[in-house]
Image (cartoon, grey):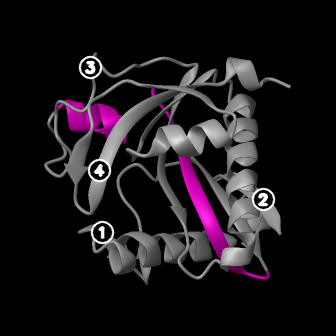
Amino acid sequence: MQTTTLSFENLHNHGELFANFFRARKQSFIVQKNWDLPEALDMEYDQYDTPASRWIAIHEFGEVYAGIRLTPTTMKCGMYSYMIRDAQRGLLGTIPEDLLYEEAPVDEQTWECTRVFVSHTTPQRIRRRVHALMVAAMLKGSREQGASKLITLTASNWPRWFGRCGLDAKAVGREMFIGDGDYQCVMIDLTSNLH
């Protein structure tokens, strides 16, 4: 199994992986979760998939088992910044504006982690390994970009999962029902995982 951090700078080195990543996102978010998201060429995407972002793929033999998108909180593209902040600013009707207790950060050392998924086709016998690879790649990829914190909108059962993964995290917003389940904004402190 491989872990690859994709960017607009290196996607030409990875053949179909970039397209397969977005195909897996479509399967996870549009087909499985039934979320109303943009799609084209059998791929899910949104306005936050820009050259500023990085995409982490856990994959083997062309199949994407899991993925993560990382975006700097300093990102701007037209009227958009990053997903959590834009939701707070009322630009996204599908996510409540009161998702955070305080104003969304705009900080070079804070990155956003979104569109996290594990493909439904990922065999049960390797899921624990896939989760471990996701966490390791998220930490490494974030630190390579200079991040010391990650803000994420994640399933509200995060304390159980994050604790098992050794992540230092705290809630920075209320629990809320979005689309298919309960979610909550969480801040992950990367400084305790600098080994």
The local crowd at label 2, few if under 14, some if 14 to 19, many if 20 or more residues have their Cα within 10 Å, is some
Measured in 3D between alpha carbons, the distance from the residue under mark 4 to the one under mark 3, in whole angstroms, is 17 Å
SS for callout 2:
strand
* Residue type beneath disc 1: Pro
Viewer-side label of 4, 1: 4
SS for callout 3:
loop
Q: Residue 20's image quarter?
A: bottom right
Q: Which residue is mark 2?
A: 3
Measured in 3D between alpha carbons, the distance from the residue under mark 2 to the one under mark 4, in whole angstroms, is 28 Å
* Residue 60 placement (x, y as % from top left): 78, 76
Q: Which residue is mark 1?
A: 38
The local crowd at label 1, few if under 14, some if 14 to 19, many if 20 or more residues have their Cα within 10 Å, is few
Measured in 3D between alpha carbons, the distance from the residue under mark 3 to the one under mark 1, in whole angstroms, is 29 Å
Q: Residue 138's image quarter?
A: top right
The local crowd at label 3, few if under 14, some if 14 to 19, many if 20 or more residues have their Cα within 10 Å, is few
The answer to which of marks 1 and 2 sits earlier in the sequence is 2
Q: Residue at x 58, y 19 (%)?
A: 109
Q: Which residue is mark 3?
A: 101
Identify whether 48 is placed above or below 109. Answer: below
* Residue type beneath disc 3: Tyr
* Residue 169 placement (x, y as % from top left): 54, 27
Residue 76 appears in the picture as rendered:
no
Residue 182's disc is 4
* Residue type beneath disc 2: Thr
Magenta stretch in the rendered image: 61-89
Contact between labelled residues 3 and 2, with CB atoms less than 8 Å apart: no
In the foreground, 128 or 104? 128
The answer to which of marks 2 and 4 sits earlier in the sequence is 2
Identify whether 101 is placed above or below 124. Answer: above
